Image (tube, coloured by chain):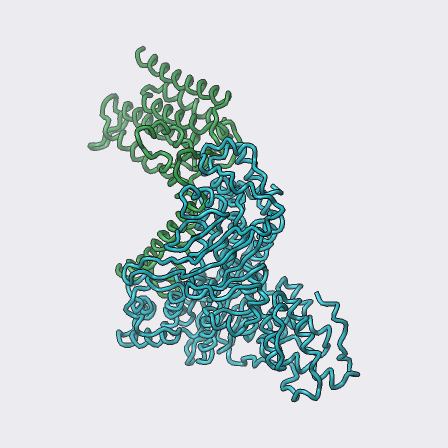
Amino acid sequence: MDDKNTVFPAETEIIREDLHDASHDVIPDAVSKEIQDIILENVEFSYLHPETGSIAALSGVSLSIARGTHTALLGRNGSGKSTLAKLVNVLEMPQSGAVLVMGRDTRDDAAFWSIRRSCGMVFQNPDNQIVGTTVEEDVAFGPENLGVPSAEIRIRVDEALAYVGLSDLAKRQPSQLSGGQKQKLAIAGILAMQPHILLLDESTSMLDPVSRDEFLAVVDRLVREKNMTVLHITHDMAEACLADRVYVLNHGRLAMGGTPGEIFSQVKKVRELGLDVPVFAELAYEVAARLGLAMERQTLFSRASALDGIRKMLKSVSAGTLRPMNAAACPVSAVQEGRTVLEVSHLSHSYDKKSEPSLSDVSFSVNEGEIFAIIGHSGSGKTTLISHLNGLLRPKEGEITIYPKEGAASLNTRKNTDVRLIRRTVGLLFQYPEYQLFEETVEKDIGFGPSKMGLSADEIKTRVLESIVLVGLDETFLKRSPFELSGGQKRRVAFAGVLAMDPDILVLDEPAAGLDPTGRREILSYAEKLKKRGKTIILVSHNMDESARYADRILVLKHGTVCALMTPQELFADPAKIRELGLCAPETVACLTELQKDYPSVNSCYFRVGDAADELIRAASNASANPGAGDTITSRGGAI
Amino acid sequence: MMKDISIGRYYQGDSILHRLDPRVKIVLCFLYMVVVFMMSSVAGILATFIVVAFLCLLSSIPIGRILESVRPIVFLLLFVFVLNILTNRTGNPVLAWGIFKITDNGLLTAGLMALRLFLLIVSTSILLTLTTTPLLMADSLESLFGPLKRIHVPVHEMAMMMSIALRFVPTLVEETDKIMKAQASRGAEYDTGNVFARAKGYVSVLVPLFVSAFKRAEELAIAMDARCYRGGEGRTKLHVLHMQGKDYILLISLSGLAIMLIIIDFYVKIR
């Protein structure tokens, strides 16, 4: 399996002759780096839409991807990225132009099976691509389709499962796997078909950070060890930095192409395209902008290189050239000292007697008007905890008390029988809420909650309108069917559906999961907007950067117990503590901590990139003003 | 939790019956069904009872677990028993009260009838549902009905649909739970409120569930397409069903037992 051009001897016995095509096995390894595995020439593709006619998904796209390289494809939702992947895999065919895969035209019928067989594709939703009833049956599905003899399938299945590290789970049912394991299973299923090209269509977007890293490690090994060609469609800019090349699509056109460094040095342009740059690149950009320096292009592909760039720029800072920067001290976020609106005390819960408790002795209280983040890995009990907050689960042990506004009587979710009153006070928005839309029109769907509260028709109308405007849509959407909206719009309508119930406390479970960077920012900005209106927000997330940036306080949940409850500044000030809790620091904190080695006076507790850049320049100018004060520039060779 | 839901009533084990070729089990299962229904003498039923008990021993499944499979039909058993007692008026009366008359013949046929149903359930459980995974059952049905492909019955497609359905049961159960919680958060009612509120509550669950099931089906079809699926022709299998010596031995000996039972019953009757 080490040499990807090895053909199993048994392959000659394959019944399906057309699948057994040796043309891609004759390329000598020595020149493989120059071989272009995927070539798109002026490709046009449009979908037919029943009402509006054809919609162009790709227009005039030309690009080529070399063998054994890792290419990232970026772009907003609906920019044509998935279509491009489907063209490569012959799931779609171009209307004009040509797609050449391994040197063969996808429109050539004779090449059809050989191309599809050499391209493996991992899709976004782990559940919807597993066919087999057990793990090994699923891996066997591809080779079975190819007509590989049974003994040979056995070998391939075992090898593929060992490669991705799932050998122990071979007999399990897919439903017993975690999301990350399911995606690794999908890779194993593809490996067993011995492809040369791996297409990842937002395969990491539904994974938590830990599984995501594991998944990416497998992908990286495939490129290095098996000389696999990888095309990775992603919304995550840090993932894009792992690629050799990056292409950006915008409205079906190729907007940018180059190495990650080249792409992310053009911060403005990338942002115009609705994308983000990785935090370290943004930090370098902000520092350069503040110092009026030009940025070096090739430096922005990794954190280490970006930090080197920043060090160079900071060296030019001297006390004289800069006006003294503001705010030297760590910004103490205004901890909301409002009254308590929600109190959880000694809450424990287990789904059945045999298994470990999913929550044990959880106690905390939430203050009015704060953004309260709950972070923790998958399986840490987050979902169980929030299901308790609005009475979906009643506490068996412990108490939850809600204190609504206007001096109303407090609600105890265990004793209080009127669950409607509780749900009116605490609104809960589950992960991927777009799946809960069901009415014929957006208006009716948003109005479902309020109508259940027994409000008058006029009142419902006002609330529906108010909430749809709050999530950035307008009344033209009200008469449309929720099912014809785009993914991001559906998400907002679902959000509005909970807002329309006007709860005092809003629990948001990963509200931005799976959205592109602009979508993420917008959804989170609604949380801030609501906070300004006096709402209390409980934000469940596994994104450290966002939790640190938006939250007033963070609760860390691990194996169903509360590990820490403090402000982001307290939590992330201490690298040892972060490690101890098994978290990863927000990217700004990681960068600043790294630069502390050069400028000991740098305070690492800044979560917004602009603030971090200010802090760096302050520290640097301080250092050059009093070189004796300990802020001497130490060796730069010590960078990661 | 929801994730551990098991499909069917398969009992994990490694007994002779577990390892027996599932096609043999299906054939034997039908054979024993016929035998149980043919038994009309006390001796015949008792002999069948002994054979089924022997099969239970072979399966090495705890007796409690086997009896559990009878639980759903306990009511039916009682009903059949009582009905037979009350309707059979031949033979000597044992007890009479008003229009009710219980006879010895009635008791006998009622007992036989109930025991027959009981044996029917136990033998199918032992031979099939408790010792065979649903997937293997789908596989062996495909293999047994394979000859029907000649007359264009889509046997492979039906087996594939069956196994995909099995694969998605836990996923959809989990999803239903999720949607129910989400809609409950928005005030949907499932077991409170009036009929209309409840109906609306279920609509709010069923619509998203169907929409999502269709979406899943579409995505799965694309994923299968991408993995070169194109029907059953020329397709190979990871697990091929192979009849081995022990399968033939068990098939012959257990069929022999069944035939012996028929002979005993016949012999007792003509005497």
Kindly indicate which chain is depicted in cyan in the rendered structure: A
Where residue A552 sits, quadrant-wise, is bottom right
Q: Residue at x 51, y 50 (%)?
A: A182
**Residue closest to the far top:** B271
Residue A21 at x, y = what percent? 49, 38
Q: Nearer the viewer, residue B175 or B140?
A: B140
**For this view, does A215 lie left or right of residue A123?**
right
As displayed, is residue B171 above or below residue A239? above
Q: Nearer the viewer, residue A53 or B165?
A: A53
Residue B49 at x, y = what percent? 41, 24
**For this view, does B6 lie left or right of residue A356?**
left
As displayed, is residue B130 above or below residue A71? above
Q: Residue at x 35, y 34 (%)?
A: B155
Residue A339 at x, y = what percent? 51, 79
Where residue A418 sits, quadrant-wise, is bottom left
Residue A131 at x, y = what percent? 44, 44
Where residue B196 sits, quadrant-wise, is bottom left
Shade representing chain B? green
